[in-house]
Image (spheres, rainbow, N blue to C red):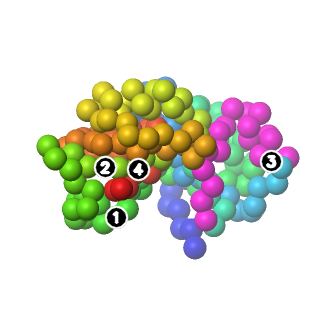
Amino acid sequence: SFQGVGEMAANFARVRAGSGLAPVRVLVHFSRSLDRDTLDRLSASGLRLVGPLPDRAFIVRVSHVGQLAVLSEAGATWLGALYPQDNMPPRIGRDGIGLWALRSENTADLRLKYYPDEDPELVRLLLEALGGTVLATSSLTTEYTVNMPVDQLQVLAFADSIRWLEEM
């Protein structure tokens, strides 16, 4: 069961502190299931629900503090930060990359899922800027298979466009 802590506006201010005025992705918990009308109202306000989660929670892209009222009207009860460790299996954070994924020159083969509202070309450019080599891509599943320098893993986990990464 979901147990968020803190008031929505204060939590949003903490999340927003490091991003300036750029939109941010946050976890939002709702007190009830969202029907089509509610989803349409959220979308019309500029909110982007980019990932459903269990227990009536979503990953939501929020652009400004004024959208918090729309979220509240839709039944949002809590909003909180997404952390880099939310983007990978706990085992990677604890033990590092699995030996099966390691390749020569301290690189690893990874599967990366990006958010569906991201431009795939910009994600590819990010991967290449971090020294990655794209091995395969799927716009249908919004993912890349990439060979990536292991020392760039934490940078990649902090990237706002990356939803999930795991070894191949």
Q: Which of marks 3 and 1 is nearer the N terminus?
A: 3
For the residues bearing labels 2 and 4, Cβ distance under 8 angstroms: no
Front-lying residue, 106 or 58: 106
Label 3 sits on residue: 38
Q: From which residue to which does the magenta span run?
A: 37-54
* Gap between marks 4 and 3 measured at Cα: 33 Å
The residue type indicated by label 2 comes to Asp
Quadrant location, the C terminus: bottom left
Name the mark on residue 90: 1
For the residues bearing labels 3 and 1, Cβ distance under 8 angstroms: no
Q: Position of residue 5 (x, y in %)?
A: 50, 61
Label 4 sits on residue: 111
* Gap between marks 3 and 1 measured at Cα: 34 Å
Name the residue at 73% across, 55% down: 75
Residue farthest right in this picture: 37
Image-quadrant location for residue 52: bottom right
Q: Which of marks 4 and 3 is nearer the N terminus?
A: 3
Above or below: residue 91 compared with residue 131:
below
Q: In this view, does 66 lie to the left or right of 43?
A: left
Let me know if residue 114 appears in the view.
no
* Gap between marks 3 and 2 measured at Cα: 40 Å
The residue type indicated by label 1 comes to Pro
Is disc 2 placed on a helix, strand or loop? strand
Q: Earlier in the sequence, mark 1 or mark 2?
A: 1
Front-lying residue, 142 or 57: 142
Name the residue at 56% across, 68% down: 2
